[in-house]
Image (cartoon, coloured by chain):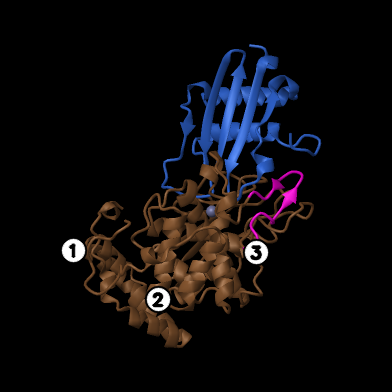
Amino acid sequence: MTTRGTRHIHSIHCILPPYLLRSIAENGTPQQRVKALHTVATDSTFRALRFAGGRVAASTSSVRRMPAMMVESQRQRSIYDLKGEEAFPGTLVRSEGQGPCGDTAADEAFEGLGATYDFFWEILGRNSIDGDGMPLQAYVHYGRDYDNAFWDGRRMVFGDGDGELFNRFTIALDVIAHELAHGVTEDEGPLWYFRQAGALNESMSDVFGSLVKQRLLGQTVDQADWLIGAGLLAEEVEGTALRSMKEPGTAFDDDVLGKDPQPGHMRDYVNTWEDNGGVHINSGIPNRAFCLTAMSLGGSAWERAGRIWYEAMRDPRIMPDTNFSDFARITVMAATRLYGAGNEEAAVKEAWEEVGIRVSRDRVSIPQWGPGGGGVQPGA
Amino acid sequence: MSRDSVRIQLSQEGGLAAFPGLARPRSVELGELPAEQAEAIEQGLRDARFHELPSVVEGSGPRGADQRQYTLTVEEGARRHSVKLVEPVEDPHLRELLSLVRRATRRRGGHWN
Ligand SMILES: [Zn+2]
């Protein structure tokens, strides 16, 4: 995305008066909210324009994306069976409109992609990974005894687990949603998959992974377990999940796997070259900031906290090397933009402070999105 | 070249979660393995032209996330070659080699070493 590098971003967000967003968010019925969000804030269109400096040249993509805002749903899922190979393309075993195929992993992947698609569409007004109805492809039975799941830039891939340490990776809805959300983050932003930017990328996937699960189960912030991958660790393993967003570092402590290395505060930040600079380690810090925000706001985490994080993820000021404190500032600004200077803004700010990141008042009070303010974006 | 002098080391990082216990490098001497397994690995090294590979072998696809990276090192006396592989590994020979080495360096007697 070359336009991302441009320094003078004429933000089309200027045409969205904050009061409109606020009134939608506060006063609309859930249904109105969804509709309004579909037509107003979803806007891959706006984003495309925004990045093109407002030039009509962006019309190729806005025209392409326009129909996406009109339709109800463009869920298009395909599940492929790799039959133990680590090579593509495998065999198509279930596609949209078909009933269960009888293969547990394939059917779980199908349902999981559906729940995730529905979450992005119904809650955030986003039509699939690219905002334009991109077909979703999941590959199951990758490799033998394969203990992992990943996003390869186009598709989601799931192993069966070895049975001794891990169960099949489709067992946890939040893991499926985590992988799909990597596609969304990649489509939205230029975040490097390295150090703090990479940990933010990881954290976004955990946030949406958990939200998809919470929403499907109808859980409030107090009812949610805030775990990622509950049920994925095999029975003999000492542990409950891959990560805990609420209490990073407590998900497992096992002879073979070792101890959960996630910090939940900046003072415990782990400097390492491994794991792309600790992307799956330090993500505990922004994960906990999100959880604290949601807990403080109460109710359903996807409604306000999730919305704020999604807005932040789509903010054009996200750069390849955006770090935790940049992102903290962007989330506070997103809260202010969506809900005004109220509880939400305070909750976000306090949450970051609790994990050791201070967002100073003067740095967030700059009116980045005011009418007519489509000039140079500071901090870009 | 005597089989006993060939040592193979595999380390793994990345993946969906960070597990310190799985990140430890594991190694095996070909001489310690059953002859059949050792032969298969020797053949695998030849088929993959391991010693001619660059130090990093990545797929041609776009970015992605949660992929594992493996570092495979082969030492034969003074000769030592290390290759970092990012999955999914596209070359079938290399994939086969990785799978052989993974099996050989995996749990032995029920434990990871
Ligand atoms: Zn991930």
Q: Chain of mark 1?
A: A
Query: Could you say which chain is coloured blue in the image?
Result: B
Say which colour chain A has. Answer: brown
The percent position of residue A282, horizontal first and vertical second, equals: 56, 51
Quick check: A3 left or right of A355?
left
User: Decide: marks 1, 3 in contact (CB < 8 A)?
Assistant: no
Q: CA distance from mark 2 to mark 3?
A: 44 Å
- Let me know if marks 1 and 2 both belong to one chain: yes
Residue at left offset 25%, top offset 65%: A49
Say whether residue A125 is left or right of residue A60: right
Residue drawn at 45 percent across, 56 percent down: A325
Find residue A124 and report its horizontal and vertical position in percent: 44, 73
Local secondary structure at mark 1: loop
Q: Amino acid at mark 2?
A: Leu
Residue shown at the point (57%, 32%) measured from the top left: B71
Q: Nearer the viewer, residue A37 or A180?
A: A37
Which amino acid type is marked by label 1? Arg
Does the segment drawn in magenta span residue A251?
Answer: yes
Query: What residue is disc 1 on?
Result: A55
Q: Report the amino acid beneath label 3.
A: Gly
Q: Which residue is mark 2?
A: A338
Question: Magenta stretch?
Answer: A246-261
- Mark 3 lies on residue: A102
Disc ID at residue B19: none
